[in-house]
Image (tube, coloured by chain):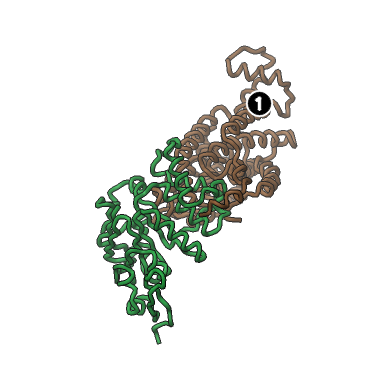
Amino acid sequence: MQVDIEDLSVGIAGARLVEDIALRADSGRFVGLVGPNGSGKSTVLRCVYRALRPTAGRVLLAGDDLHGMTARESARRLAALPQESGSEFDFTVAEVVAMGRLPHQGAAGRVTAADTEACAAALARTGAAHLAGRGFLTLSGGEKQRVLIARALAQQPEVLVLDEPTNHLDIAQQLEVLSLVRSSGLTVLAALHDLNLAATHCDVLYVIAGGRIVAAGPPHDVLSAELLADVFGVRAHRVPHPVTGAPQLLFDRLTVQ
Amino acid sequence: MATTHQDTAPTTRAARRLPLPPLIAGLAAALLASLLCGVAFGASGLSWSEVLRYLHAGLTGGTLRADESAAYTIVWELRFPRALLAAVVGAGLSAVGVAVQAMVRNALADPFVLGISSGAAVGANAVLLFGALGSLGVWALSSAAFASALGAMALVYAAARTPHGLTPLRLVLTGSAMFYGFSAVTTLMVFGAERGEAARSAMMWLLGSLGGATWANLPIAAAAVLAGLGWLLWCARRLNALAMGDETAAALGVDPARLRRSLFVVTAAVTGAVVAVSGAIGFVGLMVPHVARMLVGADHRRVLAVAPLLGAVLLVWVDTLSRLLLAPVELPVGVITALLGVPCFVLLMRRRGYTFGGA
């Protein structure tokens, strides 16, 4: 399912957090949002998974205005992994994954065969089936992220929104999470911190700085030494990945004096 | 990929969840038995056969000998409504405790953290100490308590509100601050009052008591608790989402601000209705939700099915003990809940490897 963001702006108490964001994620593509801390990546994503209402502009899911749908309707088409540390409460993995069925169920509705099936499939897909009986709070960071992806898949969405999904993970877990997301075949919109990971996993990158999109396109076109200097203030050298050929960045020093 | 770890999956956590239907049936049976015991045990020694005969007479409208009327009054007019009210209050405080903990996403919250109960105490003490609302007669105390609980609710709501709705931390902070404010007003009133006996009953009210139970004040409290519980059960899945965090709830199609607003109003109203008839009985609303979670896990559909029954059973026994331990002196219920509850709770927590907040 295609996602379009049109002229999106968010202002809180007079301050513009993001302005005139235009973004397009074609069906089945992995779109990365990169930029320095505080540039507005999360703000854009929060508008997409409806934790925040934009002050202006629209988000379209396959052409339908997101905010014209009920929250439940849009949650059936779009799932998200927000940047949130999780609950104080000791839910099991199975219970966490089952929450993904919420938008498909009536408030007091019974658990249907479709619910059970979707949860089992999501757990199997993410290799988390053996964790089902475990307490979510006892899992490692990588396991938690896999379970949260399973919850998102149980939602049976067509779009997946991820806010810094590789934070606090070791490198193996980072690769595991991104390849899991990639192999889902869903339209993915993800804020990513690591530019080299973004370059290898994303089809399209949007660079956001100071609340505005400053560059967009395939990683190869976008991640130039000039952009790194302008946006991140670092001097970088670009080399092709010896195996995949994706652009990889080697950082040198800050550009400022 | 990780399916090779199959056999390392610990079974202890999965095994911890007790099956729900037998547990509920068992608790319901325990509640019935507890109610009977609550009616049978008391300072004036009545035999089981007498108690059962009077209960039967009360329920079916049978006839009794004239010399039995005093004993009948004890069973039917005093002990039975009192045991029922204990069950209602225990169930209500436990259900509200579950909801408030999810609402502010804090395992240490209880029904009184929002300041509602101490607000109710202000109204109740105005009646007890200064005879306010005298024109309402027997209804004065509970009406004043409920009205001031609603007033406290409005105040806390107005103070905690932000443009983004009610946020957990602000709610807890505002509620706690209001709690101290209202408590200070109550203390002032107790000190300002002249009558010693009234000050004593005000104290009793602050610690909670079911001594005021009558057939008249039972239905309102019961209706409030049942309606509140029904609504909470209907919301149980959304409570799960809310407990995971506001962002997650939004991503799952739940409007966290709206749900929290409704939860605040419902829990405050139920707390007000319960506190109006029993005072501020502490600890039940904090402890019972956790015991329920130790038994059946964190899923609110299960917790909300179990916690009210547990709370009802607990409070019936606690009230019975409060009448018996130092009879004829009656102890405040809150004293027994804490004396009994604290060691039980600590033991349970240590034995079951209970986890919250990752600790």
Q: Which residue is mark 1?
A: B36
Residue at left offset 63%, top offset 20%: B55
Q: Position of residue A199 (x, y in %)?
A: 38, 68
Q: Position of residue B133 (x, y in %)?
A: 50, 38
Does residue B169 appear left or right of residue A5 in this picture? right
Q: Amino acid at mark 1?
A: Leu
Front-most of residues B142 and B59 = B59
Residue at left offset 53%, top offset 51%: B3
Front-most of residues B269 and B305 = B305
Marked residue chain, label 1: B
Q: Is residue A172 above or below residue B188?
A: below
Chain B's colour is brown
Residue B185 visible, this angle: no
Task: Give the mark count.
Answer: 1
Residue at left offset 62%, top offset 23%: B76
Q: Is residue B169 above or below residue B197?
A: below
Front-most of residues B357 and A220 = A220
Q: Position of residue B261 (x, y in %)?
A: 42, 47
Quarter of the view holding residue A209: bottom left
Q: Is residue A55 above or below residue A225?
A: above
Packing grade of label 1 (10 A; few <14, some 14-19, many >=20) is many
Chain A's colour is green
Residue A32 visible, this angle: yes
Quarter occupied by the C terminus of chain B = bottom right
Quarter of the view holding residue A198: bottom left
Residue furthest bottom as drawn: A257
Does residue B59 appear left or right of residue B170 in this picture? right
Q: Secondary structure at mark 1?
A: helix
Q: Position of residue B160 (x, y in %)?
A: 45, 55
Quarter of the view holding residue A256: bottom left
Residue furthest front as drawn: A243
